[in-house]
Amino acid sequence: MIQIIEKVNSMVNNFIWGVPAMVCIFGVGLYLSIRTGFLQIRKFPYAIRTTIGRIFRKRNASDGALTPFQAVCTALAATVGTGNIAGVAGAIAIGGPGAVFWMWISAILGMCTKFAEVTLAVHFREVNANGELVGGPMYYIKNGLGKKWVWLAYLFSAFGVLTVFGTGNATQVNTITTAINSALLNFHIIDTGAVAMSNLIIGIVMAVLVALILLGGVKRIGQVAEKLVPFMALFYIVLALGVVAVNIQVLPSVFASIFEGAFCPSAVTGGVIGSMITSMKKGVSRGIFSNEAGLGTGSIAHACADTRKPVKQGMFGIFEVFTDTIVICTLTALVILCSQVPVAYGEAAGAELTIQGFTAVYGNWVSVFTAVAMCCFAFSTTIGWGLYGARCIEFLFSEKVIRPFMVVYSLVAILGATANLGLMWSIAETFNGLMAIPNLIALFLLAGTVVKLTREYFAGNDQ
């Protein structure tokens, strides 16, 4: 039975994350960019100026809402995860250095996609029975496309609920246990025989922490996210910049290998990776999986923002993709390529390749800091996806099921810490991709609304 499930899931997964799906996500991003006159490029200085300014502006949100900064931190909490460490390494190993170039291209288009998602989510959001602002793809499908498209909103929500337990929770907690146990084993604090007990203890602690935060409501989620995300992002960026600084002399050749590898991978990988399509597919899929542009999930957090200007909050979508992919994912790639650790091109790789890049420069002691970074990344993702799952199940049923869902979601952390998650990760990845289909249809059909809102906003501003 398990083999049948694996085979069916593999077929669906290969299609969802294959070339046709990449073309759809790429295509919608390009379509939105053209319709808005490549807003993400034209208004990029304004987007950075506006978002950075609001980050340092102290303010309180109304009841049932988040400040705009808390909203973007919650969204970043879900997107900036272990994939920024492990996923980029995997993309380079399978697609060569050129995959980084295609990751950048997907991010440029993804900025406009994310802008559209956030803008629509804020514009079409509602207030639930608890007085909280709720929104996201299911709401802009329901309120923007009308009753005949409501089935698409339910489809998105159903895929969302099926996704969160794997992508947002179990696999993230499993990463935390792996990181902590690696550090404990390296420093001989525990031996291999104690790993199982360590996993159980970590799982129970994680379940309690997740429950305490999520059951505290959207405000507590935002408060934790606004403190955790800046810390973990700056912490990782400083470590990565140190690696680049030490190896600054090879930086020009690294960038040369990225651009050359994008169009002629064999010239950089010694012929192991000879297809530009392979490089492109890995780079684009890595970019999409990292920043979630096209999946619609991040807009669920942004819909909670205490703002009356959808387009202004949409600028955070541009900032979010830039921070996640252009900054953090690029730094991960530079850690691997600048440190010149051996890469087995054509073979799967993960976080261990990135960690090798750090240890090559700093020594084995840095494994403690990389473990801390991975734990922060994974924990923040668990919190962010908890909110996404709550909003999806609330849309399917009612706000009465939110607390029971939160309890079940928290307990899944124990499963994630103690079980082998190979098949669960694969299935969750498939449902993650399936979420994109209803969202992309909605974005395509609501492109005119995005253009209208954008024109109206900038017509009333001097920028």
Image (cartoon, rainbow, N blue to C red):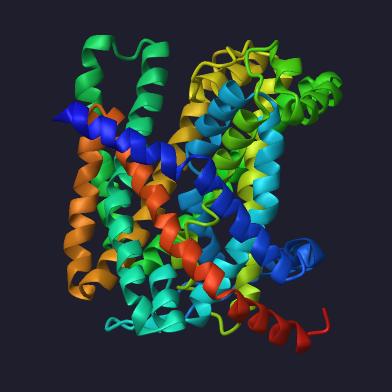
Q: Residue at x 79, y 31 (%)?
A: 259
Quadrant showing the C terminus: bottom right
Q: Residue at x 28, y 57 (%)?
A: 161
Whether residue 383 sits left or right of residue 355 in the image: it is: left
Quadrant showing the N terminus: top left
| Residue 206 locus on image (x, y percent) | 28, 42
Snapshot quadrant of residue 113: bottom right
Q: Nearer the viewer, residue 124 or 237?
A: 124
Would you place residue 406 above or below residue 268 in this image? below
Whether residue 337 sits left or right of residue 68 in the image: it is: right
Q: Nearer the viewer, residue 369 or 441?
A: 441
Residue sticking out furthest to the front: 20
Q: Residue at x 70, y 87 (%)?
A: 456
Q: Nearer the viewer, residue 109 or 82?
A: 109
Q: Nearer the viewer, residue 256 or 275?
A: 275
| Residue 227 locus on image (x, y percent) | 51, 54
Q: Residue at x 35, y 41 (%)?
A: 12
Would you place residue 324 above or below residue 438 in this image? above
In this view of the protein, can residue 454 be seen by the observer? yes
